[in-house]
Image (cartoon, rainbow, N blue to C red):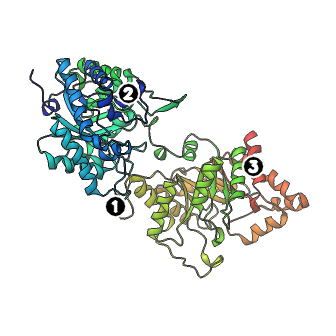
Amino acid sequence: MTKTTFQELLTAGKPALADGAMGTLLHEKGVSFNKCFDELNLTKPSLVADIHHAYIEAGSQIILTNTFGANRYKLGRHGMLDQLEAINTAGVDLARRVVLASFKEVLIAGDVGPLGIPLAPFGRVQPEDARRAFREQIEVLLNADVDLLVIETMTDLYELREALTAARELSNDISIVASMTFTRDDRTLLGDSPRKVARNLAEFGADVIGINCSGGPNQLLRILKEMHRAFPEGKYWIKPNAGWPEQNGGRIFYPATADYFSDYALSFWRAGASVMGGCCGTTPEHIAAMRQALDSTTITEINGQVEIEASVETEVPETQKPTLLAQKLAKGKFVFAVEMDPPRGLSTHKVLAGASLLAEAGADVINVADSPMARMRMSPWAVCSLVQKKAKIETTLHFPTRGRNLLRVQGDLLAAHALDVRNVFVVMGDPTAIGDYPDAMDNYDLAPSGLIKLIKQGFNTGVDHSGSDIGQPTSFFVGCALNLTSPDLAREVKVINRKIEGGADFVLTQPLYSKEPVEKFLEGYREIAGTDFPLPILAGVLPLASARHAAFLQQEVPGIDIPQPVHELMQAAGENGAREGIRLAIELIAQLRTVSQGIYLMPAFNHFDYAAEIIEASLKS
């Protein structure tokens, strides 16, 4: 029998079919996950042999040796370092005996997994030590005469480079598959994109670029397409898990069925896969289904078939989905945003208690101010993160440009996104002259319109202000301020249009006490711009606490105009001013529903209980 070489399989026209999971089936046969699976080559060879045989009968043209963890670091944890050569040799010999007994043309791939310990600078293993460890295992596999090497399930691109280098130092003739695994956000554990992985693996000397483990077929199809676009001349190996694992009753289950893999086999083919198979959770049934799909389809037919598209709904990374606020506004929901100030000291108990109360009342998002009135407070993105985690409600981060240079602006944005704070309200910010530290630096590199453009046209496309790659795009949803009562409406339209052109998604207004300013602005904007105002408006509502409070806002806060009838009602309310303020706010919100897409509620004096009452009453009306 003449054995087909790996290179012949790669150029055969149809993709080659590899095997599925080894560890999954060993575990199903009663082997604990705490056990050294590689040792079974010596102690229970029939278990391993039966699995190899099942995959060959299912149609695998390539089987991987049971040597995934047979390196010095992993074996050392089990006290088996002295058996490294015996275990790897036995793994190859065992696979060869099964292949010979099958009378089929099946290639044996020497399986090399990660060392299981991080490399410097994230761990203590130096690159040269890693290379020696890989060389030690790979040399045994080559001496045992494997047909190719598969270096798989790597999370660190540079650990894989050391493995490839070690293999090439030993042989320039052996074919090598280099396969990375990815997290839910379609990046490696250390943040490398599929495009970078594809290009680097080619540069490192891999014959075939691989993707394995990770999520199910849907995610790996998406990653395969991105890799193929970055390096179209490459050969690709793809072995997905049977979906994301779930634990039930102490057992681990994988949801993706054999039929599901059958459907995706043809999509992998069309997307450029040269070899496919399965990883964790897959079985001979999955491989048999893929075999049938490949065998029943010709090369001519595959070009005319409709490819399954990688879904952006079920497996898109959470950090790339639109924020809840964005989704609600897109659906036309009338939203309630509530402003909260960060604490002056370390205690966040009051903030979290208030946020929880508002979430229960029906608020959609908590807006966390940044040093309001230029007074020192806790950094708002820390408060946003705590509120989201502990009060379970989404937040909007107020992001002033004042007092931040370009370096700080961009670093703070990355910090916010890393904490999953993705709604930002861009504003100039209060001048330091009015606050606790009047002599503090008050400079800024970007006006609000410039910062909006940086976020939406820079960070959200994956580049910083200089055009350098930031690794992956952010997904910020950006709000900006709108002055409804500007004495120079034409200038205000010009300013807001710059923000719209930069990519602003919604606007917040100063406090209103009638709907008339919104109506007048919308009419004026339409006349000047020749079109309707394009962004959702969240109208500001600041409930009055007393007649004196109303007088203060009218006389001392720029941009606030309280109609005389409201002043008279507050005066007449006397000691019941707060109750009257709540009533007026509820009445105003009902009116604003016709001219805005939501409310930006600013509770005076931290009366979150009043805000909760207003939201509950407004939702019932």
- The Cα–Cα distance between marks 2 and 1, rounded to whole angstroms, is 47 Å
Q: Are marks 2 and 1 in contact (CB under 8 Å)?
A: no
Among all residues in the image, which is located at the extreme left?
2
Visible in this render: residue 481? no
In the visual, does 41 lie left or right of 401?
left
Reading the image, the residue beneath label 2 is 26
Reading the image, the residue beneath label 1 is 468
Closer to us: mark 2 or mark 3?
2
Q: Amino acid at mark 3?
A: Ala
Write down the quadrant of residue 22 in the picture.
Answer: top left
Instruction: Label 3: state its secondary structure.
Output: helix
- Is residue 242 positioned above or below 444 on the image? above
- Is residue 1 positioned above or below 6 on the image? above
Question: Residue drawn 72% across and 53% down?
Answer: 353
Q: Nearer the viewer, residue 53 or 555?
A: 53
- Residue 163 lies, in percent from the top left, at 24, 48
Reading the image, the residue beneath label 3 is 612
Crowding at dot 2, Cα within 10 Å, few <14 / some 14-19 / many 20+, comes out as some
Q: Amino acid at mark 2?
A: Leu
